[in-house]
Amino acid sequence: MGREVYLLTGNPDKVKSARKAFEKTDVELKQLENNYPEIQAESSLEIAKNTVEQAVKEYDKPVVREDHSLYLDAVPGFPGPYLSYFDGNLPAEKLIELLENQERTGYFEIATVLGLPNGKIKEYQSRVPVEISEEIKGNKRNWDRVLMLKGEKETFAESSGESRLEIWNRNYRRIAEEITREK
């Protein structure tokens, strides 16, 4: 086995996404669950970077952290890195009302940070365009019942995340390729 990289998350979907990205490398991906206080910041990149810096100091190992923000075109800056809060407190029905007669598009900003024991920090960002359905569809989590990839008809709640891992794990793949090349 080659190098080890620690993925700092308790989210099983992020673990699955990262494992898929690293599966054809000799880099061993290990999950690291530690609840560092998450800073309030204007971007996912700042949040992920802060958490990685804390973890690298504590563990002296390569650490990866990913954070997602959602930006709606009709409401600039909203909800941004506060997605989890609004998803937990604003019902999907209210989100649909808020966007009535408004642009129903936006994007996920996926920020991934790799911290190395030598103090070097590498940042990766990608965007995933989304649309907001005009109706509630599916039974899974709140906003997942109205969010869908741009150009698709199924909401996240109706679809299998497996088929879309390649979309969500771009940053993990870039990290896996870079680490493999550095040998």
Image (tube, grey):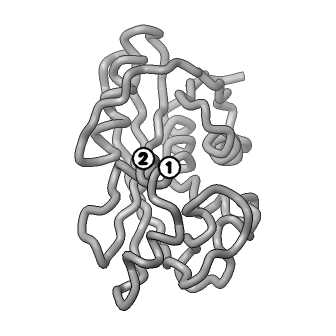
Query: Quick one: quadrant of the N terminus?
Result: top right
- Mark 1 residue element: helix
- Mark 2 residue element: helix
Residue 108, percent from left and from top: 43, 62
Dot 2, how many residues are within 10 Å of its Cα: few (below 14), some (14-19), or many (20+)?
few
Residue at 39% of width from left, 80% of height from top? 99
Total tally of numbered discs in the picture: 2
Which residue has dot 1 on it?
Answer: 88
The vertical placement of 132 against 7, above or below, is below
Dot 1, how many residues are within 10 Å of its Cα: few (below 14), some (14-19), or many (20+)?
few
The vertical placement of 55 against 83, above or below, is above
Horizontally, residue 161 falls left or right of residue 151, namely: right
Residue 155, located in which quarter of the rendered image?
Answer: bottom right
Horizontally, residue 20 falls left or right of residue 93, namely: right
Q: Which residue type carries mark 2? A: Tyr
Residue 181, percent from left and from top: 52, 39
Residue at 65% of width from left, 66% of height from top? 156
Q: Which residue type carries mark 1? A: Gly
The vertical placement of 101 against 39, above or below, is below
Marker disc for residue 85: 2
Gap in Å between the C-alphas at discs 1 and 2? 5 Å
Residue 13, percent from left and from top: 66, 45
Residue at 38% of width from left, 53% of height from top? 125
**CB within 8 Å, label 1 to label 2:** yes
Residue 111, percent from left and from top: 40, 48
Residue at 57% of width from left, 37% of height from top? 180
Residue 77, located in which quarter of the rendered image?
Answer: bottom left
Horizontally, residue 177 falls left or right of residue 116, namely: right
Front residue of 6/40: it is 40
Front residue of 44/37: it is 37
